[in-house]
Image: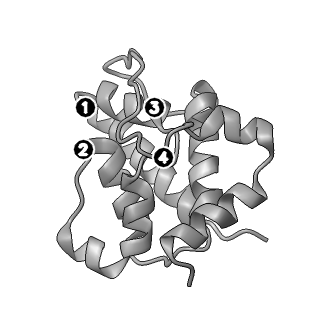
Amino acid sequence: MLQTGECFSYVLKKLSPDFIKMYIPTSLNFMTNNINNITIKDNEVFNPANYPNAVSELSALKLGTEETAIYFKAEIIISYLKDHSLNAAWLEANPTLSRMITSGFFKTSHLESLFESSRRNKTFLNNFEEYISKQLLMRKD
């Protein structure tokens, strides 16, 4: 298993320069991303085709965290994107992923905006969380 610094180097080596410019903040000290205002209708259901920027950010997260341990991966990422909080047991079980996610290394403004905008629409929120979990835990072939 790679340590946090090794993971960052590994990710940067795998990504194209254009991809890095679009989806990784320029400062690694960047703790929170700017939130975009997105309107989620009360009866809307999450459809990834409607949110290509969020899907791209999630793809970068998946690629960038693929060498980290699987322990609580979906829970850590979803909880941090949704509330900027992590369970202490998750931190202990997967410290490398926890540090990567909380460092601001990944650009996640669209993902965070969807969480913020969907707080009142539980159906959308549940669909969105399920989609993220499936994408993160899907094995590459």
Depth order, front residue of 72/133: 72
Residue depicted at 42% across the width and 55% down the height: 101
Pick whichever of labels 2 and 1 is earlier in the sequence: 2
Q: Position of residue 98 (x, y in %)?
A: 37, 65
Label 2 secondary element: helix
- The answer to whether residue 23 is above or below residue 73 is above
Label 2 neighbourhood size at 10 Å, few (<14), some (14-19), many (20+)? few
- 44 horizontally vs 122: left or right: right
The span from disc 2 to disc 3 (Cα, nearest Å) is: 13 Å
Q: Position of residue 111 (x, y in %)?
A: 46, 36
Amino acid type shown at disc 2: Asp
Label 1 secondary element: loop
Residue depicted at 51% across the width and 77% down the height: 3
CB under 8 Å between discs 1 and 3 = no
Mark seen at residue 28: 4
Q: Residue lying furthest bottom in this view?
A: 1
Pick whichever of labels 4 and 2 is earlier in the sequence: 4
Q: Disc 3 marks which residue?
A: 109
Q: Disc 1 marks which residue?
A: 119
Amino acid type shown at disc 3: Ser
